[in-house]
Image (tube, rainbow, N blue to C red):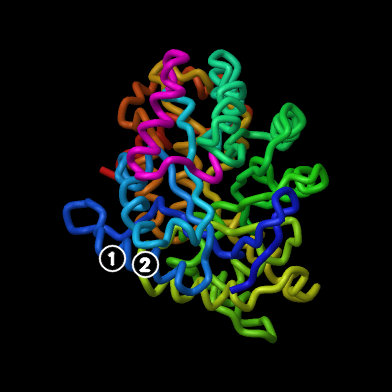
Amino acid sequence: MKYRTNSKTGESVSLLGFGAMRLPLNADGSIDEAEAVRMIRYAIDNGVNYVDTAYPYHNGKSEPLVGKALKDGYREKVILATKLPVWAIKKREDRYTLLETQLKRLDVPSVDNYLVHDINEGSYNAVKKFDVMDFMREMKAADKIKNIGFSYHGSTVEFFKELIDLFDWDFVQIQLNYMDAEYQAGVAGMKYAAAKGIPVVIMEPLRGGKLVNVIPDTIRAYWDRASVKRTPAEWALAWVANFPEVLTILSGMSAMEQVEDNLRILSAAEQDGLTAEELAIIEQVADEYNKRIPYGCTACRYCLPCPAKIEIPAVIEIRNEVDMYGSKANMKFAYDNFLDPKPTVCTACKQCEEICPQHLNVSGIMAETAGMFA
């Protein structure tokens, strides 16, 4: 396993981190606990020393599972990260209750890395309203948490930079893959944080599996042109690992084969290890994926607020990605877990269509997307 040094703490961190959001499941949808524990411990035995979970993962069952996996001496081998669900804070006392619940679930007295979960332009209001950063500092002083960070899901790199400058963060977590080089924080945000001395943890390097699960023929043709042959997972992970600013890359692994594959790939990946030719091929692949987008939504958000409270750009993104990545199954997790309410509640009032700069048939897209996942 390759390791990179945390510039703030001096810790040696494995390039592969275990993300506990997509654990193996039983037929009834519950976590296959025996297999999940086996996978996490196998990863640790083979050099992984960063394990990441969160309050809502697997409907609150991920943290207890991680706690079980880290028994028998495994806790001492890893940097343990979890996240404060800002959306669940309704009063100031909730900050303490939530952390204590998480520590109880994990069955530990403290965690190493504690993140303000899912900061975006809207949720940051709750961060300010409930003095979340004062709470984080207090918990750090009390040795309940060691390092303070945040995971970013805002819409612009400008807002990300504002957040970076607001607090002396110990680390930050962003979504990054070759399709998201300019999405949310993107490469520019990663480099900005690193220039400020803030270590960067990467999530969604495979875009939730969409870059590897089903490969359209037009995409495979580009990979086949490369002089060095790699699997789609190797290309995606090598692209992220190529950046020296990256501290560790979280992968949500749901099968032992994925653990073994990721261990192999990130035990060989090098920073600045891709050639100009290889980077050009990756850029061509990204361009080809983007050509497959059926609806040209720019996420300008002029359509919001929706009277039915639908997050319209998120629905269109899911609909687009069905065509982009060639598989409805790839998007079912996002549709089931990240859309509330679902587009089924659309009344076709067409208020959004009157102001959409792209003149999209929004109500039709809502109905089409709802039908896909019915």
Nearer-the-camera pick, 148 or 226: 148
Q: What residue type is labelled 2?
A: Met
Q: Determine which quarter of the picture holds residue 298.
A: top right
- Whether residue 94 is in magenta: the answer is yes
Q: Determine which quarter of the picture holds residue 6.
A: bottom right
Mark 1 and mark 2: span between their CA atoms? Answer: 6 Å
User: What secondary structure is marked by label 2?
Assistant: helix
Which residue is at a point 60% across and 37% down the rendered structure image?
A: 150
- Whether residue 288 is in magenta: the answer is no
What x and y, as percent, mark residue 296?
59, 42
Q: What residue type is labelled 1?
A: Glu
Left or right side of 329 for 326: right
* Region of the chain picked out in magenta, as a range: 89-114
Nearer-the-camera pick, 27 or 89: 89
How many labels sit on residues?
Answer: 2
Which residue is at a point 78% across and 76% down the rendered structure image?
A: 275
- C-beta proximity under 8 Å, tags 1 and 2: yes
* Residue to which mark 1 is pinned: 35
Q: How crowded is mark 1: few (under 14 residues within 10 Å), some or many (20 or more)?
A: some
What x and y, as percent, mark residue 291?
61, 56
User: Considering the image in quadrants, where does the C terminus appear?
Assistant: top left
Which residue is at a point 53% across and 21% down the rendered structure image?
A: 304
Q: Residues within 10 Å of mark 2 (few under 14, many from 20)?
A: many
User: What secondary structure is marked by label 1?
Assistant: helix
Nearer-the-camera pick, 302 or 58: 58
- The image shows residue 19, relative to residue 93, as above or below, that is below
Which residue is at a point 44% across and 53% down the rendered structure image?
A: 322
* Residue to which mark 2 is pinned: 39
- The image shows residue 185, relative to residue 346, as above or below, that is below
Q: Determine which quarter of the picture holds residue 271.
A: bottom right
User: Considering the image in quadrants, where does the N terminus appear?
Assistant: bottom right
